[in-house]
Amino acid sequence: MKGVTKYEAGKAWNGYTLFCKTFGRPKVEGEPPRKVYLIDMEGRPVHEWHVETTLQSYCHLLPNGNLLQPTHDRSDVARGPFGLYELDPDSNVVWSYRCRIDHDFQPLANGHLLIHTITENFWPALGPAQKRQPYIIEIARDGELLWQWRGEEHLGELEELLTPAGWRQVMDRARGEFAFDWAHNNTLQVIPPNATYEKERSSGRAARFKPGNIIFSYRSNDVIGVIERPTGRIVWAWGPGVLDGQHKPHMLPNGNILIFDNGTLRGFSRVIEYNPLTDRIEWSYTGTPRESFLSRYISSAQRLPNGNTLICEGGKSRLFEVTPDGQVVWEFVNPYRSEHASPSIYRCTRYAPEYAEPLLRRSGG
């Protein structure tokens, strides 16, 4: 039992932090509730949701106070229920969509949902056996399929964009240690307005980072990239030889990309801010000593409005906030354990008090 171990209120960005653990199978009768937590800066839960399904540890708080909750990313279709669920503050299911959801999703401003899910098929260019494939869809709230994208159809673009050594790594792993789950996409982000796009546009270059395009993350081969939304083409890719099992790359308003670089093989994790125009890492956070900060899998980072960075060191169930110069100003070690859940935390999100106000008002918090 630890909870909050450090809190400098004058330096931290104060709000509410959402997190949960992973439950790989549905709840059965007699088991204790499985919970999603929203905590304050002192580590006290200000709201909890109870979940009956499997649970992938990334949930999203909607502006109206409801929660979007995905099932475990590898849920067996025969075990259901599975997919994406919307829960009200009392944990009642008010909407759901059946799919093999995998790692990430994003609500869109028009009410639609962008979801990363998975398929399995044979694709000879990747080798002779059946493969798990990245598959992104956009759906309306009534379940209508509006757009879809299949990763295996865009291998040629990756080959063109990566260095020969980078492409060789992709194919070696797809035919070797990651023969089945060759990509393991763990991210989709709809690119927001950003300075890199404005620089590309003003210089007359191809606008690869145009708002509305999509960032993805192929963890199995250390590749991140950008999908051009109108055409479906991969228009930018980078990472082999620099990244190592990364999670949650996403574009910041300044046009840089924030990445939790796990260091699965390297032996230490880091959070980096990468400039895709200059090919430079402009900011990074590592532990002291470096090996003290390590999560070989899962994890995330979020840039906060005051310039601090909220980091989820998922393998250690540790959430902490650092200033631009690397000073830890808030730290929370998850004290809530369950014999039926993974002890790790996949991702966390900090919300402003005014964003959480509708939830707290509806729940009496």
Image: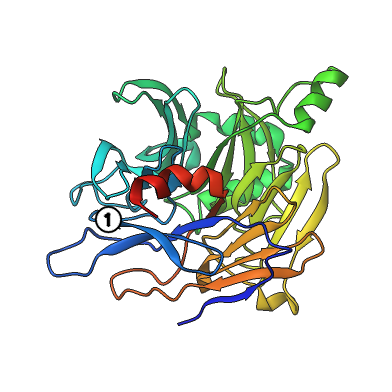
**Total marks drawn?**
1
- Does residue 300 appear anywhere in the picture? yes
Which residue does the image show at 18% across and 48% down from the upper left?
78
Q: What is the x, y in percent for residue 256?
A: 76, 42
Dot 1 crowding, Cα within 10 Å, few <14, some 14–19, many 20+:
many
Q: Is residue 353 above or below residue 139?
A: below
Which residue does the image show at 42% across and 57% down from the upper left?
57
Residue 140 sits in which quadrant?
top left
Amino acid type at circle 1 is: Val
Which residue does the image show at 72% across and 48% down from the upper left?
165
- Does residue 348 appear anywhere in the picture? no
Disc 1 marks which residue? Answer: 51
Residue 344 sits in which quadrant?
bottom left
Position of the C terminus by quadrant: bottom left
Q: What is the x, y in percent for residue 193?
A: 69, 29
In this rendering, position of residue 351 left or right of residue 240 = left
User: What SS does tag 1 mark?
Assistant: strand
Residue 197 sits in which quadrant?
top right
Query: 264 or 163, which lies in front?
Result: 264
Q: What is the x, y in percent for residue 154?
A: 55, 30
